[in-house]
Image (tube, grey):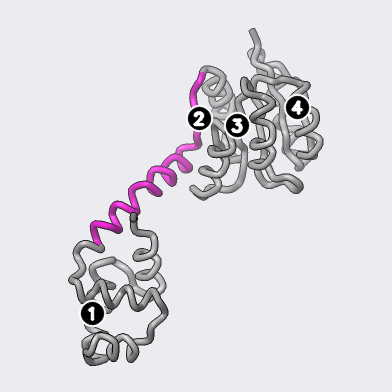
Amino acid sequence: MKTRISLVDDDEETRKVLVEVVRREPTLEYVSDYGNSALAVRKLPGDQPDVVLMDINMPDPNGVECVRLLRPKMPRTQFLMLTVYESADHVFAALKAGATGYLIKNTRREELLAAIHQISAGGSPMTSAIARKVVQSFIEPVETNAKLEELTPKERKVLEFLSQGYLYKEIADTMSISVTTVTTHIRNVYEKLHVRTRSQAIAKYLTRNG
């Protein structure tokens, strides 16, 4: 039995290429394609494809919201996101909405077809670069926590004040230490956290677990 495919992408040229890829593959059956996500939300439940190739960067609604609206109406359909976005935030948003795969648009034809077959068989295909970013997003907070643990109590306090917008002089006055000592603590913080700027140090402090 062929896998039934629908496509949603507001870029006409991209859509044409994808339709051609699907039509040339003997194991797939082209069902429909839409260049308007609002229209897709209305029409796709009636098409009942096995897999939907969904672009993210579309207006009113975007691809993630489109999946969120369609998922309750199409529980047996798998949604494979095709996008130029490589950030972990976009991946998590798409997966939370109900997508089961995530590929970058410049994925080769062979990889796209393999991903379609994989998602049809119950897998969750993901471009390797995206998978690394997702894994890294889980690893980085753990590494950051370990580095924060290396700070002395006073260094942590200085970093906490920095995150609250305190100036060096204000930190010195609050902690009853000299500005020179504050500067030394901050230099040690930078070295232990492997950062070079105040904003980078604060970012690591704010993204810690817990």
Q: Quadrant of residue 169?
A: bottom left
Q: Kindly check if marks 4 and 2 are in contact, taking CB atoms under 8 A apart as contact.
A: no
Which residue does the image show at 73% across and 38% down from the upper left? 9
Label 1 amino acid? Answer: His
Q: Which residue is mark 4?
A: 44
Left or right of residue 32, residue 181 in this image: left
Label 2 amino acid? Answer: Pro
Question: In the rendering, which numbered label is found on residue 185?
Answer: 1
Q: Is residue 186 above or below residue 70?
A: below
Q: Kindly check if marks 2 and 1 are in contact, taking CB atoms under 8 A apart as contact.
A: no
**First in sequence: mark 4 or mark 1?**
4
Q: Which residue is mark 3?
A: 80
Q: Residue furthest top?
A: 1
Q: Which residues are magenta?
A: 122-147
Label 3 amino acid? Answer: Leu
* 4 vs 2, front mark: 4
Cα gap from disc 1 to disc 3, whole angstroms: 49 Å
Q: Kindly check if marks 2 and 3 are in contact, taking CB atoms under 8 A apart as contact.
A: yes
Q: Residues within 10 Å of mark 3 (few under 14, many from 20)?
A: many
> Does dot 3 land on a helix, a strand or a loop?
strand
Of 25 and 54, nearer the camera is 54
